[in-house]
Image: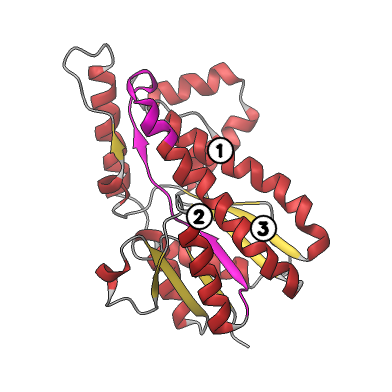
Amino acid sequence: MSKVVLITGGSSGIGKSIGTFLNTKGYIVYGTSRNPQHYKDSPFPILTLDVKDGETIMKTVQDVINKEGRLDVVINNAGTGITGPIEEIPDTEIKNNFETNFFGPLKVIKAVLPQMRKQNAGLIINITSIAGYMGLPYRGVYSASKGALELITEAYRMELKNFNIKMTNVAPGDFATNIAAGRYHAPLLDDSPYYKTYKDTLELMNTHVDHGSNPNMMAEAVCKIIETNNPKVHYKVGAFMQKFSIVLKRILPDTVYEKLLMNHYKL
């Protein structure tokens, strides 16, 4: 029997690549978007869901269950970027980022767990980020929101063991998607003490995305995880040096690693 998969943020970027790939493999795939009417040419259905709106989450999850009778895999992919000097990012934007990247996935998880418990089976994949393993300059809020999702997944996994529900993190590096277009950028202020370093770092970040890996790499990785009996706690997908940066953080003294990052970003 084909597994039923729900992907938040499945209309573009990594989410669309994952959904398209799984669809070709015979999975029953549903994606979500805040504006599904814009994606009528999607190879799989796109349903209305805003991860900041609990009502849309509950309705869409129930609609899928009513139609298919089950829900086997949920991929928390919806997320948003944010850049800027932490001092200059408005509090409302920081809270908004956490609402999308952290509290949103938690709302989705809470909505699907009753069905997965009823089935005595299920898999939840949280798409985080390699940036969530380290505090990156001018991406500190993003690093924090993704890092929080990484850590809470570790705890959640243990709490769900008795119900045969599995959960894992997949941390992508830089992929060639449209994430930069939807990212909140704190404005470059001419009189800001961070003006030059923020400007240079922003240009470097955009270059990384423009020259990022093919998102199909993430799609293939997620498919392998779904087909694994006992997924690991953490997966990292991306260029070698991006994954290796996590290893370096683990083995190097903090100040040495900090200096490496500052040299990389020319700070």
Q: Are marks 2 and 3 in contact (CB under 8 Å)?
A: no
Query: Start and end of the magenta stretch?
Result: 70-95
Q: Label 1, label 3: how many angstroms apart (C-alpha)? A: 16 Å
Residue placed at 34% from the left, 33% from the top?
83
Q: Does residue 177 lie above or below 137 as drawn?
A: below
Residue 54 position within the rendered picture, expressed as x and y whole percent measured from the top left: 50, 55
Element at label 3: strand
Q: Which mark is residue 59?
A: none
Circle 1 packing at 10 Å, graded few (<14), some (14-19), many (20+), is many
* Residue 22 seen in the figure: no
Element at label 2: helix
Residue 258 position within the rendered picture, expressed as x and y whole percent measured from the top left: 50, 21
Circle 3 residue: 167
Circle 1 residue: 147
Question: With 132 as the anchor, is 14 left or right in this view?
Answer: left
Q: Does residue 49 lie above or below 98 as drawn?
A: below
* Residue 72 seen in the figure: yes
Q: Are marks 2 and 1 in contact (CB under 8 Å)?
A: no
Reading the chain from its start, which is encountered first: label 1 or label 3?
A: 1
Q: Does residue 2 lie above or below 153 as drawn?
A: below
Q: What residue type is disc 2 on?
A: Gly
Please identify the quadrant where the N terminus is shown. Answer: bottom right
Q: Which mark is residue 54?
A: 2
Residue placed at 41% from the left, 21% from the top?
262
Residue 105 position within the rendered picture, expressed as x and y whole percent measured from the top left: 54, 52
Residue nearest the observer in this picture, 85 or 238: 85
Q: What residue type is disc 3 on?
A: Met
